[in-house]
Image (cartoon, coloured by chain):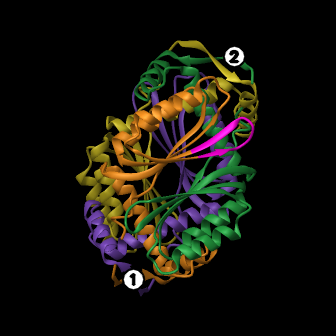
Chain colours: A yellow, B green, C orange, D purple
Amino acid sequence: MPKIRFTVSLEENLLTEFDQVLKHRNYTNRSEAIRDLIRQNLIEEEWEEGAEVIGNITMVYNHHERELAHELTHTQHDFNDVIISTQHVHIDHDNCLEVIVVRGKVSEITQLYNTLKATGGVKQCELIRSTTGQLLN
Amino acid sequence: MPKIRFTVSLEENLLTEFDQVLKHRNYTNRSEAIRDLIRQNLIEEEWEEGAEVIGNITMVYNHHERELAHELTHTQHDFNDVIISTQHVHIDHDNCLEVIVVRGKVSEITQLYNTLKATGGVKQCELIRSTTGQLLN
Amino acid sequence: MPKIRFTVSLEENLLTEFDQVLKHRNYTNRSEAIRDLIRQNLIEEEWEEGAEVIGNITMVYNHHERELAHELTHTQHDFNDVIISTQHVHIDHDNCLEVIVVRGKVSEITQLYNTLKATGGVKQCELIRSTTGQLLN
Amino acid sequence: MPKIRFTVSLEENLLTEFDQVLKHRNYTNRSEAIRDLIRQNLIEEEWEEGAEVIGNITMVYNHHERELAHELTHTQHDFNDVIISTQHVHIDHDNCLEVIVVRGKVSEITQLYNTLKATGGVKQCELIRSTTGQLLN
C-alpha cells in the first residue's frame, strides 16, 4: 500500500509535549504515533457501525466448578460460525484462562459474549474489540 | 501561540477512512481532528503523572434523603481548597444533579471523589478528567 | 421509597477481598457499595437504549481564539432545548472551562457533543453520561 | 470454596430495573450478576496495585511489512519470562491477529505492551487486564 503525505499544523507547545509522551511510550517516529491514534479511532467506528469485525473474548473460570467447562464448550459450539480458535491457559490447579478469537457481526459476537459472561462460575469475561485490519491498510 | 507545521506519512486507504469518519463527526479540518487526538492523549498523561489538574465531579442524589445534602456540603467544605465552584440542577421533585469543578493534585481530588462516591444515598458519582489547558496551548 | 432486602451468596474469599477494597474506597456500608455497582450498570443501559437522559459536556478552550467563544455560544443556542445550564470557569488568562448540563434524547445530545468537539480551537470536549435518577429511585 | 450469604437492602424500583437488565443480558441468577460486578471491581484494583497479574496483548499487523514479524518475535523473546503463549490467526492474505497471554508484574507487562504498540506497522495493540483468579476464588 503506497503512503501519501499530508501536513498538520499545530501549536508549538502541543508538539513539544506530544514528543515527550512519545519518548516515554517508546515511539521513535511521530507519524507512527499519529497513525496509531487514527487507527484506534477507526476501530471504535467499525464496532459502532455494527459491521463485520474481529476481536476476542477473554474468560477466567474454575474448571472444577460442576458442569461449567461442559456448559462453556456447549455455548461455544452453538456459536461456532463466529469462533475462529480458542487458546487455553492453565493458570493454576483450579483456574483457567480462555481467549476465544471471534469474527463476525457485532450483534452475534455480543450475543455470545453476553451468554458466556452470564454463565454461573465465570469469574471474568471481557470482550476485546479488534479489527480485520482491512480498513486500516 | 504560533503554529508550526509537520508532515505525516500515511497509507492512502487509512487517510480515506479517517476523512470519512471526520465528516461523520462534523470535523471540517483534518489538522483539528489530529490535534484533538493528540490533546486527549496528553490529558491522560497529565492525570497519570499526578500533576496539578482540573476536572469535575458529577453527582446525582435525592435531596429528600435524610441528612444527605448536609453531609455532602460538609464534605465539600473539607475540601474547599480544591473546589472552584458547584453547579446545581433540580432534575425533578426529588433528584439533584451537582457538578463540582475541581482543581488541584490528583491525589486530593481522588480523595474527595472517593468520599462523595461512598456517601450513602448518592446515586451516581463520576470523576471527569479535564485539563488546565496550559500544556495544550 | 421503601427498601427491600435480598440475599446474595458469595465465596468467602471474594467477600473478604471486596470488603478490603470498600475500606480503601471509604465505604462504611456494603449494601451502599453494591447499590453503586448496580446503579452504574443501569446508567450504562439507559444510554445504550437511547432514552431520555441527563449528562454534561465538559469543554476547555482558549477564549482569545478568534471567533471561537461566539461560535460555541451560537451552537449552544441551536441546541437550547437540550441545554439546562452552563457553568463557566476562568482557568487562567487564556483558558476557559465550560460545563454544559444537558437533558434530552441520546441522539440530540450526541449531535451537540460532536458539533462542539469538532469546532476548531476546542482543546478538550468530553460527554459525561449521567442519569435523571428516576430509574434509580 | 464454601459460599457464605449476606443481605443487601435496596430500593424496590432499583431492584426491578436491575432484574430487567439481567434478563436482557442473559443472567438467570441475581447473585451471579452481583458476583460479576464485584469481581470486575477487584480486577481493576489488582492492576492499580501493580501486583502479579495475568492478561493478554492483542495485536493486528501486516506480516508483509518489511522486518515487522521478525521485530515482533524479537521483542517477545526479550520478554519471554512474562509471556505464557501466543495464538496467531491469519485474518487474510496480509493481516495477522496475535493474542499474547502474559503473566507477571504490571510494570513489566506494561513495558512489553508499550514496546509492541510503538513498533512501526502494528495496526492495533491493546492490553487486556485479566486476573489470576486467585483473589476471586
Q: Main secondary structure of the magenta part?
A: strand
Q: Quadrant of residue B83?
A: bottom right
**Residue C92 included in the magenta stretch of the image:** yes
| Quadrant that contains the N terminus of chain C | bottom left
Q: Is residue B60 left or right of residue A80?
A: right
Above or below B48: residue D61: above
Residue D61 in view (yes/no): no
Q: Which residue is mark 2?
A: B5
Where is residue C84? Give x, y as percent: 44, 49
Look at 46% across and 64% down and name the residue there.
Answer: B96
Where is residue D97? Give x, y as percent: 47, 37
Look at 65% across and 43% down and name the residue there.
Answer: B43
Query: Which chain does the residue under circle 1 lie in?
Result: D
- Disc 1 residue type (three-letter): Ser
Regarding mark 1 in the picture, which secondary structure is present there? Answer: strand
Looking at the rendering, the stretch of residues picked out in magenta corresponds to: C88-98
Q: Which residue is mark 1?
A: D9
- Disc 2 residue type (three-letter): Arg
Where is residue B18? Give x, y as percent: 47, 24
As rendered, which of A73 and C114 lies closer to the eye?
Answer: C114
Q: Quadrant of residue D55?
A: bottom right
Where is residue D107? Give x, y as percent: 70, 54
Query: Which chain does the residue under circle 2 lie in?
Result: B
Look at 59% across and 24% down and name the residue there.
Answer: C67
Regarding mark 2 in the picture, which secondary structure is present there? Answer: strand
Look at 31% across and 77% down and name the residue there.
Answer: D12
